[in-house]
Amino acid sequence: MTKTYDQYRESTLGRADVEDTPELLAYYRQLEDLKVGALWTVANKIEPWQPKSDSVPVVWRYKDLRETVLRSVELVTPEKAGRRVIYLNNPGRTEVSAAVGWLYSGLQVMHPGELASAHAHSSSALRFIMEGRGAYTIVDGHKMTLGANDFVLTPNGTWHEHGVESDGLPCIWQDGLDIPLVNALEAGFYAVHPDLQQAVGFPVDDQVSLWGAAGLRPQNIGWNKPYSPLFKYQWEPTYEALRRYSEAREDNPFDGALMHYTNPVSGGHVMATIGASMQLLRPGFVGKAHRHTGSFLYQVAKGKGYSIINGQRLDWQERDIFCVPSWAWHEHVNESGTDDACLFCFSDLPVMEKLGLYREEALADNDGHQPVATSN
């Protein structure tokens, strides 16, 4: 009797429809001795019908983490630790220290007068400032001052260091890197600056002055590097742009008003392997569910609400962080009737797009909404 497609697919989810026999088992052992294997024993594991992420939906609540992060200041110094960071460990990705998929994230804390040594690495990195005053980053000699909700790049291969001015306040920011991806590709290098600190060779915030004017490009300033020259994207103009965008058109049914941070030279993503965005959910916004390939890590820049991810409700408020694994159904809701909610996000979207692996689909059932199985 011929099997239907669904019956065939169900029968081969774990492995091909081949029954073990004494002869086959002996054959498999022979193959192992030769350091080879039979494809039919692993085909459906290594070539699934659709993506199945090991990552699980998680929300890291800032009110639960903040005091623990600050306590690390009493226990280790930036000099001893290299970087004083508490990293986010997804229960499904602990073997690679990832927050979701192949993306790493951590909360770094620095006190006034502290600075970390300059270093460079193969991984692309970003910073999203959560709280404090007086923080700065230096990237290849360009010093940038940092405020809450500012988004900062430290692209792969650049010398970079961080610190807090002596008259500032304790600062906490989120680090985002593609360390797990670079390690999976076995391409990671790390170096410490020979002088430990780098000289500042340009006026403070010069890259913002040169490249930060919306729609304008400076003349006679060449830039041919594979990342954005605008190392700092400030919160105030970002929020204003989102508000104008939201007022100018109807909401996207899934993401409200969503805007991508871009390279002002190319118009593309800010870095080759990590993309970033900010979206505004208007008061009372109820998004519909969709899913797409790629791993996405969100930080709440403003407001509060919740997201439903694969049937699990995750409530969030300002400074909380949550993740959406690849091919997970998700929808976002702003519960407030009066205030905007804004979500910063970084992802591996540039990788998905460049490799031709990006795919997206909307949920057709239940008017585009998931049933909620659990809440967190």
Image: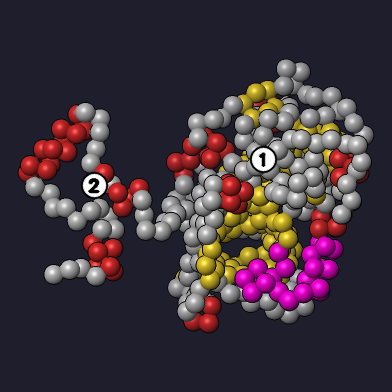
Q: Quadrant of residue 227?
A: top right
Residue 208 seen in this snapshot: no
Name the spot of residue 263 as percent of width and height, x first: 76, 47
Q: Which mark is residue 140?
A: none
Q: Residue 99 vs residue 41: left or right?
A: right
Residue type for callout 1: Ala
The location of residue 11, given as percent across then percent down, is 23, 62
Numbered circle sitting on residue 125: 1
Q: Nearer the viewer, residue 344 or 276?
A: 276
Q: Does the stretch in magenta take in 247?
A: yes
The kind of residue tagged 2 is Thr
Vertical side of 308 occupied by 29: above or below: above
Residue placed under numbered mark 2 in the picture: 41
Q: Residue at x 77, y 53 (%)?
A: 149
Query: Which callout, 2 or 1, points at the residue further toward the start of the chain?
Result: 2
Per the rendered image, the range of residues in magenta is 239-258
Residue at mark 2 to residue at mark 1: CA–CA distance: 39 Å
Q: Could you tell me residue 56's position as x and y percent?
A: 47, 57
Q: Is residue 207 magenta?
A: no
Which quadrant of the figure has residue 9?
Answer: bottom left
Q: Is residue 31 rendered to the left or right of residue 88?
A: left
User: Please, what secondary structure does the residue beneath circle 2 have?
Assistant: helix
- Disc 1 residue crowd, few under 14, some 14–19, many 20+, Cα 10 Å: many
Determine whether 132 is above or below 259 in the image: above
Q: Is residue 28 left or right of residue 299?
A: left
Closer mark to the observer between disc 2 and disc 1: 2
Outermost bottom residue = 367
- Vertical placement of 143 versus 10: above or below? above
- The quarter of the displayed image where residue 254 is located: bottom right
